[in-house]
Image (spheres, rainbow, N blue to C red):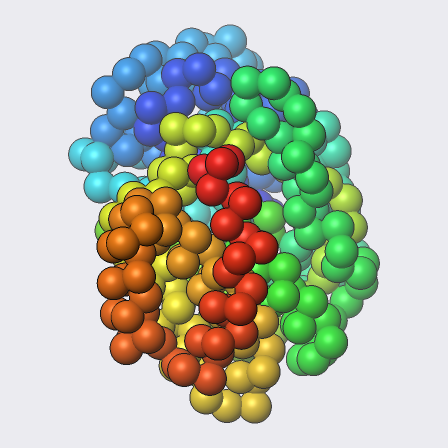
């Protein structure tokens, strides 16, 4: 029985894909499948994938599934993989990142010990691509343990606003009902914020199991119109929650709105930025507008890093 399906989309990562794959094959258990989706990558990424797989035993090679598609984006790639995944749980890994040496051992042990958990989350080491300098640890502020409808824990999750798909694994039936929205950035926000607000059981593992690479060329590293549109859609998605958990959702909304305004400032320039703020005032909930504006100043320092 396959316990875990690990989904790895591949697109223009020829400088990183070997490190990613080697981190997997060095520790690959027999009850894990790895689904690699070639999203129409025009470089040598898939040649490197094939080269790595040729060096594996026949049994290990059978644990890898290769899907090829024309370039349709990460969401389509992930969704296509979710539809064929055989594992009880589904996890994700970006092909320019890599997993810690204890990734599978830690996750599979927790699955064995906590078979009724719907979602396992964990921390990740954030590092800079060129210098290899550690920039921080994502998720380390969350307490280890089992949580179900825990208001305090959910507030911590939404306040951190780290919705990256690679920092959690989820039961397959839940992911199959929550496919990624296509042709947008920040799609993880919509998928996982919705899942966390459902009636699910969560276990947080306070260990860093993924090494997350900060690349200056990544789709979310620099301000652009598609990224700004992604922020708008994520904000509008979260603002629709007008229920008992609205106070929890608001914690992510403030963070997203600050980041949105910072990216607008970077992309549009000063004059156009204020025009965009007028549009922003029109489309967003005014009750959270003013806290965002008053905190924007201390976040503008981020601009030199974008």
Left or right: 253 as drawn, with respect to 39: right
Foreground residue among 54 and 44: 44
- Quadrant assignment, res 231: bottom left
The image position of residue 49, as x and y in percent, is 41, 18
Foreground residue among 4 and 286: 286
Q: Residue at x 58, y 71 (%)?
A: 251
Q: Residue at x 66, y 73 (%)?
A: 155
The image position of residue 210, as x and y in percent, is 64, 37
Is 56 placed above or below 293 here? above
Foreground residue among 291 and 157: 291
Residue 60: in sight, yes or no?
A: no
Left or right: 13 as drawn, with respect to 101: left
Q: Residue at x 21, y 35 (%)?
A: 71
Is 116 placed above or below 131 here? below
Left or right: 275 as drawn, with respect to 121: left
Residue 125: in sight, yes or no?
A: yes
Left or right: 244 as drawn, with respect to 190: right
The outermost residue toward the front is: 271
The image position of residue 234, as x and y in percent, is 38, 64
Q: Residue at x 50, y 90 (%)?
A: 243
- Quadrant assignment, res 221: top left
Is 146 placed above or below 113 here? below
The image position of residue 74, as x and y in percent, is 33, 42
């Amino acid at each position: 029985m396959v316990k875990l399906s690990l989904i790895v989309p591949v697109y223009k990562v020829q400088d990183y894909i070997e490190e990613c794959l080697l981190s997997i094959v060095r520790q690959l258990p027999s009850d894990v499948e790895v689904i690699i989706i070639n999203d129409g990558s025009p470089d040598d990424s898939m040649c490197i994938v094939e080269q790595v797989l040729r060096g594996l035993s026949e049994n290990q090679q059978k644990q890898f599934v290769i899907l090829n598609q024309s370039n349709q984006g990460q969401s389509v790639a992930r969704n296509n993989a979710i539809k064929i995944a055989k594992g009880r749980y589904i996890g994700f890994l970006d092909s320019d990142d890599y997993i810690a040496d204890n990734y599978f051992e830690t996750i599979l042990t927790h699955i064995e010990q906590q078979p009724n958990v719907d979602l396992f989350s964990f921390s990740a080491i954030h590092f800079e691509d060129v210098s290899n300098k550690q920039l921080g640890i994502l998720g380390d502020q969350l307490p280890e343990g089992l949580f179900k409808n825990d208001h305090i824990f959910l507030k911590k999750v939404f306040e951190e606003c780290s919705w990256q798909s690679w920092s959690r694994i989820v039961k397959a039936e839940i992911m199959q009902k929550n496919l990624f929205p296509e042709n947008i950035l920040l799609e993880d926000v919509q998928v996982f914020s919705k899942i966390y607000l459902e009636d699910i059981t969560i276990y947080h593992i306070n260990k860093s199991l993924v090494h997350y690479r900060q690349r200056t060329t990544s789709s979310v590293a620099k301000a652009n119109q598609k990224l700004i549109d992604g922020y708008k859609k994520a904000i509008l998605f979260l603002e629709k929650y007008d229920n008992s958990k609205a106070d929890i959702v608001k914690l992510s909304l403030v963070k997203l709105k600050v980041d949105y305004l910072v990216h607008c400032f970077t992309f549009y320039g000063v004059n156009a930025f204020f025009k965009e703020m007028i549009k922003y005032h029109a489309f967003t909930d005014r009750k959270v507008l003013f806290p965002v504006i008053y905190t924007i100043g201390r976040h503008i320092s981020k601009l030199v890093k974008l």
